[in-house]
Amino acid sequence: MKLTFCGGAQSVTGACYLLETEHTKLLVDCGMFQGSRFAESLNYDPFPFDPKTVQAVFITHAHIDHVGRLPKLYRDGFRGVIYATEPTIDFAREMLFDSERVIKHEARWEGIEPFYSAQDVAHVFSLTKPTPYGVMTELSQDVSYRLYEAEHILGSAMVELFVKQNGATTKIVFSGDLGNSPAPLLRDMHKEKEADFAVIESTYGNKLHEVTRARKDTLEDIIEETIAKGGTLMIPSFAAERTQELLYELNELVEHGRIPRVPVFIDSPLAIKITQLYKKHVSFYDSEAATLVKSGDEIFNFPGLKFTPTVEDSKAINAVPPPKIILAGSGMSQGGRIVYHEKLYLSDPKNTLLIIGYQVKGSLGRRLLDGEQTVKIAGAQVQVRARVIQISGYSAHADQKKLMEWIEPMRLSLKKLFVVQGEEESAQVLAQKVKDEFAVDAVVPRANDSFEL
C-alpha cells in the first residue's frame, strides 16, 4: 500500500493524505491552504490524484485547513462517502458555506472563477455519514476503521485504519490535530498503545505552552489591565472551539466577580452559529461541562454579553464607549470583522490585541505578533501602538511535550512516524526529538512525497 502527502507536508494548513491499498483508495482530510497568497493560490491547483477514484474521505475535524477543499473534491468528481462525527459534520456545514462566501468575494476581486460554489458545498453534505467514537467498522474488503477523541475541538477525531495485506493487518494512526490538554468542554484525548505507522501533527513541535491552568489567570490580568486604562480588548478568535472556550471561561470570571462587568461582544456570525451548535451536542462535552449544563448554568451566557450577527450590529459596537471586549473572526486576522476593529483600535496605546491561536506565516496576525509597527488594513496604513500579547495556553494544539506523550505508548511498535502539519523547522525539531528519545524512524515528508508501507 502507498501513502501520499497531498497537503499538510512542511505546512500547517492544507491537510490531505491519500492512502492506496490493493482494493481501496481513501483520503484523510481535504483541507484548504491558508496564510500567504501563494498558499491560497494552491487551492486552485488540480488534485495530484483523480477524485473520481477515491471511495472515502475521513475528516478529523471541521477547521477549514482540514475540510476546505471538500467542495472542490466534489466538483472534480468525488462521489464516495465522507466519514466524520456528528459535531464535525454540523460545524463543517456552517464553515464551508461561510468560506464559500469569502472565496466568491476574493475571486471576484481577483477577476477569477471561485474554485467551488455553494451548490458544491450542499452536495458535499449529501455524502456525509455520522460516525461514532470507538466503533470498529469495515470500510472495504481490505480496510477497517475506528475514530477516537483528539481533544482539539468538539467532535474532533484521530483516525485508525486497519489494512489487510499479505495475510497480515497493518495499523496506521492519523492524529488529526491533537488538543492542548486539559481543554475546557472536551473529553480527554485517546492515546493508542500500538501502531505500525503514525502520522502526527507538529504545529507546536518545537515549542512548549504555558501551563494550561494558568491561562485563565493571565486572561483575567489582561482584561483588568485593559479596563483600568479605559481601553478596548480585541481578541481575534476562531469560530469553532476558541470562541466557545473563551465564553466558558469568561462566564466563570464574570459569575465569580473576578473581572468587572463590561460589554463583551461576539462579533462573528459564524461563531454565533457554531455556539448554537455547541448547545446541540452536549453529549460530546466532558463530565464537568455536561454537569454544569444539566444544573441549569448557561455556560455561553453571562451579564454584559452581546451577540452581533448583522453588519449593523457590528458597526454599532464602535458607538459603545470603552472599556469593552470584542471577540471577532478571523482567528489569524485574515479577513472577517476583526480587521475593521484592528483598523480602528490598533493605533491607541490604551488598547490591547490578544492573540490566542496559531498564526500562519504571512497572515496579518503573524505580522502583528512579530512586532510590525505599521500594517495595511482595508486599504489604510495603521500605526500599531496598542499592546499586542499572546497567551499560548489557549492554543487548541498540543505542544511538544504533549505530542511526545501521545507518541510514547506506541514507540516500541512504530516502524515509521510521519511528522506533518507544521512549519518545516517545527516538524524537523519534533522528528529529531522522536529519533533521539524513542529511537523511532521519524520523517518529515515534502509535498506529494509517497511512501510504500
Image (tube, rainbow, N blue to C red):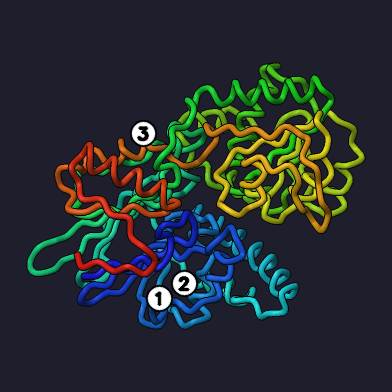
- Horizontal side, residue 236 vs residue 79: left or right: right
Q: Which amino acid does label 2 sit on?
A: Leu
Pointer 2: residues within 10 angstroms few (<14), some, or many (20+)?
some
Report helix, strand or loop for mark 3.
Answer: helix
Which residue is denoted by mark 2 in the rendering? 127
Which residue is painted at 53% across and 75% down in the image?
Answer: 72
Separation (CA) of disc 1 from disc 3:
37 Å
Q: Which badge, 3 or 2, is on the more N-terminal residue?
A: 2
Q: What element carries label 1?
A: loop
User: Going 83% across and 48% down the picture, which residue do you hit?
Assistant: 314
Q: Which comes before the other along the chain, label 1 or label 2?
A: 1
What residue does disc 1 label?
80
- Residue 19, position in %: x, y? 30, 68
Q: Which mark is residue 401?
A: 3
Where residue 83 sits in the image (x, y, percent)? 40, 63
- Asked whether, in this view, residue 123 is left or right of residue 227, the answer is left
Is 321 positioned to the left or the right of 100 in the image?
right
Q: What residue type is labelled 3?
A: Lys
Circles 1 and 3 in contact, beta carbons < 8 Å:
no
Q: How far apart are marks 1 and 2 (CA)?
A: 7 Å
Q: Is residue 420 or residue 362 the one in the foreground? A: 362
The answer to whether mark 1 and mark 2 are in CB contact below 8 A is yes
Compared with residue 220, is residue 355 higher up or lower down, i.e. above or below?
Answer: below
Number of marks in the rendered image:
3
Could you tell me which quadrant the C terminus lies in? bottom left
